[in-house]
Image (cartoon, rainbow, N blue to C red):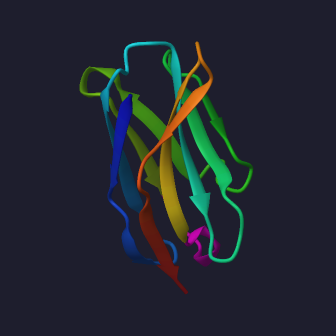
Amino acid sequence: QVQLVESGGGLVQAGGSLRLSCAASGSTRSNNVIGWYRRPPGKQRELVATITSSGNTNYADSVEGRFTISRDNAKNTVFLQMNSLKPEDTAVYYCSFRRLLTDVYYWGQGTQVTVSS
């Protein structure tokens, strides 16, 4: 089992920045991909960014160049630095841990990000 706890969400004005954190605990010692997803109001969940155990990253087109995902493997923590935020970035942001060996996903409880215009 893997437990994920997100933090860092909040209310920010358009153009501002926030940094989300995802602390992982439990059975994390395996090849994995940690990702950030979001669910905007009234919409389906969508991928924001992912990072592999070796540090390879992938971003949704809508956040490329504005968001940066990174990880501190020693602390089992993944970060999402969000700059130049837009009102359309408003969503509940979820952290996920994907164990590659079994293709099992674990999810955090989510953190609300609200960007005002």
Point 66% across, 58% down: residue:
45
Point 66% across, 48% down: residue:
47
Q: Residue 92 placed where, x, y %?
A: 51, 65
Horizontal side of residue 13 vs 74, given as left or right: right
Residue extending furthest toward the left? 75
Q: Which of these two is toward me, 26 or 12?
A: 26
Point 58% across, 51% down: residue:
37
Which of the image's four quarters has the N terminus?
Answer: top left
Q: Which of these two is toward me, 45 or 88?
A: 45
**Residue 58 shown in magenta:** no
Residue 109 vs 12, above or below: the answer is above
Residue 11 vs 39, above or below: the answer is below
Residue extending furthest toward the front? 1
Residue extending furthest toward the right? 61
Point 36% across, 41% down: residue:
4
Residue 13 vs 80, above or below: the answer is below
Is residue 16 in view from this perspective?
no
Q: Residue 12 placed where, x, y %?
A: 41, 76
Q: Main secondary structure of the magenta part?
A: loop
Query: Splitting the image into 4 quarters, where does residue 89 fall?
Result: bottom right
Total number of numbered discs in the rendering = 0
**Residue 86 shown in magenta:** yes
Magenta residue span: 83-90
Q: Residue 54 placed where, x, y %?
A: 50, 15
Q: Which of these two is toward me, 75 or 18?
A: 75
Q: Which of these two is toward me, 39 or 83?
A: 39
Which of the image's four quarters has the C terminus?
Answer: bottom right
Q: Residue 26 placed where, x, y %?
A: 30, 26
Is residue 97 in view from this perspective?
yes
